[in-house]
Image (cartoon, rainbow, N blue to C red):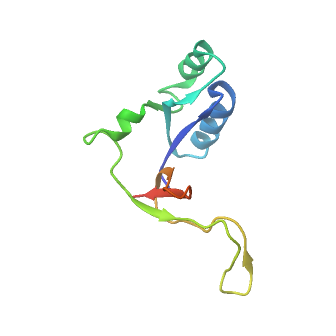
Amino acid sequence: IESVLVCGLITSVCVQHSAFSIFEAGFRTLLVTDACGDRGRARHDAALALYGDYMYELVTADDLDDPKTGLVKAKPVWLSLDSEDDGAGQENTGVRSVQETVLRTGQDPTGATVVFED
């Protein structure tokens, strides 16, 4: 994983702290501004102005979809949250490791989470 997209609620707290942790871990951090929200527009804008384009890149969903400057279309990778035997007799709970670059997530028609990879 080289680049991480960040979005979510409460831009000034949760999103900001997540973006900082990702940046601090050495990943390219892209904060999707129109996929974030706060208790008010002024608070959201102030949080983006604080570290935007310094600690993380500010992008919109349209930027990501642009064929020239956005992320490339990726094929889905399905992850299971079910317990499985890891082949060594150990039960593995949680998400299994994904070696590919993760670009974005979404849901399929059944509601299952889809992770798109490079």
Quadrant in which residue 70 is drawn: top left
The reply, left or right, for residue 98 in relation to residue 14 is left
Residue 42 spot, x, y in % from top left:
59, 12
| In the image, residue 10 above or below residue 73 | above
**109 or 29: nearer the eye?**
109
Q: Residue at x 50, y 51 (%)?
A: 105
Q: In this view, does 107 lie above or below 47?
A: below
Left or right of 89? Residue 4 is: left
Identify which residue, 54 or 76, lies in the foreground: 76
Q: Residue furthest front?
A: 110
The quarter of the rendered structure image containing the C terminus is bottom left
- What number of labels is visible? 0
| Residue under the image location 69 percent in, 65 percent down | 94
Residue 64 percent coordinates (x, y)? 37, 39
State the residue at coordinates (56%, 65%).
79
x and y percentages locating residue 59 in the rendered image: 43, 31
Say above or below: 23 vs 36. Answer: below
Viewer-proximal residue among 63 and 108: 108
Q: Position of residue 17 (x, y in %)?
A: 67, 34
Residue located farthest toward the top when viewing the structure as drawn: 42
Q: Which residue, as the protein is rendered here, is positioned at the far left?
A: 68
Q: Which residue is drawn at 43% across and 58% down?
A: 117
